[in-house]
Image (cartoon, rainbow, N blue to C red):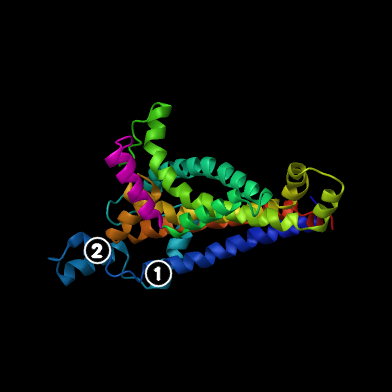
Amino acid sequence: MNKTMAKLLLNRVAMAVLTLFIVSIVVFAITNLLPGDAAEESLGQAATPETVAALRAQFGLDQPAPVRYVRWLAHIVRGDAGTSLVSGQAITEMIGKRLPNSLVLAGATAVVSVPLALSLGILSAMFRGSKFDRGMNMLAVSLVSVPEFLIATLAVLLFAVKLRWLSALSHTADIQTLSQFLRAYAMPVFTLCCVIVAQMARMTRAAVIDQLRSPYVEMARLKGAKPVRIVLTHALPNAVGPIANAVALSLSYLLGGVLIVESIFNYPGIASLMIDAVTTRDIPVVQACSLIFCGAYLLLVMLADIAAIASNPRLRNP
């Protein structure tokens, strides 16, 4: 690794850390704008102003926002997200129970969507203008236009209610065999893959076509190279950077789509934990979950930038 590339990588990491710091400020500010708080939610409508004020003081909600932010950020840096204002449990333990489930769902979706989307995108680029390419573009645009909650609802109506092949809820507690795993994850993964595959395939197609229009590809074509060799040997290696960005941006959709999917299928992940925390005004849990989602997005984008730098010969060999 030369000095230029190392400097670029360090700059990307520094920018990611700075962005995460700015995001922490935004997350803290927005969550504090939510109406009500955990004290009012815990005591209910019959609570007196005195009891609400006493509970707010016990939770530390009566402190100025800058003081609470600095204290919260200091705990986050030490790996301590604090304590839930509703259940009294440590937030790291609550997230630790739910995060593996979300990672399994995201991993299963990535394993299915990435190879499928890359294959469809490369094939569409190789046969651009054909009936296959036009059909794939129409299908991709249609899937991108349909919201994930509608896809999930239709999947439940078809596979759970009409055909009775799958359960409408994702029960992950007693999974012991591969068939049980497939039955539990089939509909959530299908719902997430519909939009992710469509987005990723379109972006992959555009990246490969952009490389196929390059002069070096025209030279290889004039030398008699076969279309498959041109794509796999010449165009695809130079499209690694744009494709990596396409994969990262598409997978980042999981961070938003998983909120709706986990809610519809009652999946015990970190997104459903965040939704429950918003309902009960458990602000520390909302802040911790939001920061995890933002950190995961920044990590995906940073990895895509690193892949683009590593695949660019002009950066590797200045």
Q: Out of 291 and 317, give the one closest to the viewer.
A: 317
Given the current orientation, which residue lies at the most extreme front position? 131
* Residue, disc 1: 30
Task: Tell me where residue 196 appears, x and y as whole percent.
Answer: 51, 51
Task: Tell me where residue 40 appears, x and y as whole percent.
Answer: 22, 65
Q: Amino acid at mark 1?
A: Ile
Q: Who's the residue at 68% across and 48% down the image?
A: 126
Q: Which mark is residue 39?
A: 2
Q: Residues within 10 Å of mark 2 (few under 14, many from 20)?
A: many
Q: Who's the residue at 42% across and 48% down the image?
A: 191
Rounded to the nearest angstrom, the CA distance separating label 2 from label 1 is 18 Å
Given the current orientation, which residue lies at the most extreme top position? 177
Is 44 drawn above or below residue 113 in the view shown? below
- Looking at the rendering, the stretch of residues picked out in magenta corresponds to 147-167
Asked if residue 266 shows in the view, the reply is no
Given the current orientation, which residue lies at the most extreme right position? 223
Residue 19 lies left or right of residue 97; in this view the side is right
Residue 134 lies left or right of residue 220; in this view the side is left
Nearer to us of marks 2 and 1 is 1
N-term mark: 2 or 1: 1
Q: Residues within 10 Å of mark 1 (few under 14, many from 20)?
A: few
Q: Out of 245 and 129, give the one closest to the viewer.
A: 129
Q: Amino acid at mark 2?
A: Ala
Q: Who's the residue at 41% across and 70% down the image?
A: 29
State how many labels appear.
2
Query: Which corner quadrant of the image does residue 43 belong to?
Result: bottom left
